[in-house]
Image (cartoon, rainbow, N blue to C red):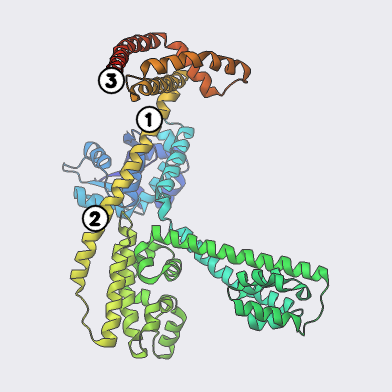
Amino acid sequence: MVLLHVLFEHAAGYALFAVKEVEEIGMLLPQVEESVLSLAKFNSMVSLAAFFPFKSAQAALENMNAISEGLVHADLKLFLETNLPLSGKKKAVLGVSDSKIGAALQEEFSMSIQTGGVVSEILRGVRLHFHSLVKGLTALAASKAQLGLGHSYSRAKVKFNVNRADNMIIQSIALLDQLDKDINTFSMRVREWYGYHFPELIKIVADNSTYCRMAQLIGNRKELSEENLEAIEEVVMDGAKAQAILDASRSSMGMDISPIDLINIERFSSRVVSLAEYRLQLQEYLRSKMGQVAPNLAALIGDVVGARLISHAGSLTNLAKYPASTVQILGAEKALFRALKTRGNTPKYGLIFHSTFIGRAAAKNKGRISRYLANKCTLASRIDCFSEVPTSVFGDKLRGQVEERLSFYETGDMPRKNVDVMKEAVKEAGEVAAEIKKKLDKKEKKRKKKERLLQEQSENGTNGDAQLENENVAETVVKKKKRPSEGPVEEAPENGAQDQASTPAKKKKRKSEPEGTVEQQEEEAATETTPAKKKKKRQEAEPAEEEAEPAVSEKKKKKKKKE
């Protein structure tokens, strides 16, 4: 008789169930389906052989990650080795829910694994009555364990470096494209609307955002004068154009317009100008994000084209998985399928056509350079996706290779070998990565130090504030000690006399003045709390005065001798 054991993975731990009357159950599947719902009937068929609870939430997460990837964790291996009868005359059969983990267990233990059929029905019943089959486990505790592990598993799957989030690039490039369309549409609306009043301005000012600024600045063309010439020149950045606008306003064929219409035109043009300014900010943000997420791809093909490739692929990881042939025609899927359907010529390039390299190549070399560029883009995206420290060294080197290939097609100069270029890139990238790691380590140390200090202060409570005050007092005392030592010893009595003379005046000033700052009060408190230090200072000053007096008397004697 073959023994069947069923492995069940729960958020609380691993459970191994022994199934009785295997052959009869195998033959009567409809009865199994009915008996699964009843706990009493199910207990007669299945009994708990062993249970291994997870020690912590972290251990549960590690085991769950291993099972989801089809790997045998050390805990699972130990549990099965301990509780499963692997040796003996009777062959043990293990039933599991997932075929991937089943294959891994079969390789590990060289035993027969069963999935599907009766095993799936038994596991359905185990899942339903698990809290009743395991002693000491309630339904509430089981649901809490499942919820906690589900949250931690999802968090671990979503967890990534926030600075290297390619989702932000996808959203920003989509918004950038939408803004381009909207700004173009709105600018044309301003041109048409303001053109009734000042039609000559359309021919003079070609740029949309500049036209909107001019419409906002000019307003009523009849009010334009020589005084406005400087302001117009600042917007247009051309003196001749500014003068042409002024001359055109005096002899314009446009219709008169009411003040309320002008106000609405100015409001709308100001909105368009603000949208254009926001677009520039968004483009700068996209450049910075590409520098963090995909620096090599951005260095090779540009920020906007690289962002479009990532957006079209869905993520940087997906783009890294694509072969170079797919990257080459990414964005030209319709043309590809049309060509396959009609048996025509397939497209040579997709989104990478917007790169400057293909535009610079001759017509006969466009297909060659697009293949070469797609190959380098694939390499750059894979380096960006799987490198720990993002650097643009490889992107710069790959760009240089594409430039060399372009010059080879034009002039015939042989480019460098890929092996030599990559060796240089690896060397430079290692140096740059080491510098970046040093900076990151320094930042991490500073952060940990701050956290430690904050923890100590929070643990000590008021003692932490007292320690900070004592440190401030000590710093002020040290500064006061340094001041007399800076000057020469001979001036000690004079300074002392001056200090004595100035002390009553200072006291009077303090009485007359309002209450000082908190820092002054702390310094006064510090001087009051340290009388012993004052005594030491006085004792040190007295011998200095005694040494200074004989020096003065010696000077007087010398003067008398000279006389």
Q: Which mark is residue 452?
A: 1
Q: Secondary structure at mark 1?
A: helix
The residue singled out by tag 3 in the image is 562
Q: Secondary structure at mark 3?
A: helix
Q: Nearer the viewer, residue 403 or 335?
A: 403
Q: Nearer the viewer, residue 546 or 83?
A: 546
Disc 1 residue type? Arg
Q: Is 534 placed above or below 452 here?
A: above
Q: Residue at x 38, y 83 (%)?
A: 360
Q: Is 241 placed above or below 548 here?
A: below
The N terminus is located in which quarter? Answer: top left
Q: Earlier in the sequence, mark 3 or mark 1?
A: 1
Q: Earlier in the sequence, mark 2 or mark 3?
A: 2
Number of other residues with Cα within 10 Å of mark 1, as a class: few under 14, some 14 to 19, many 20 or more: few
Q: Is residue 222 visible?
A: yes
Disc 2 residue type? Glu
Q: Residue at x 22, y 61 (%)?
A: 426
The residue singled out by tag 2 in the image is 431
Q: Quadrant of residue 458?
A: top left
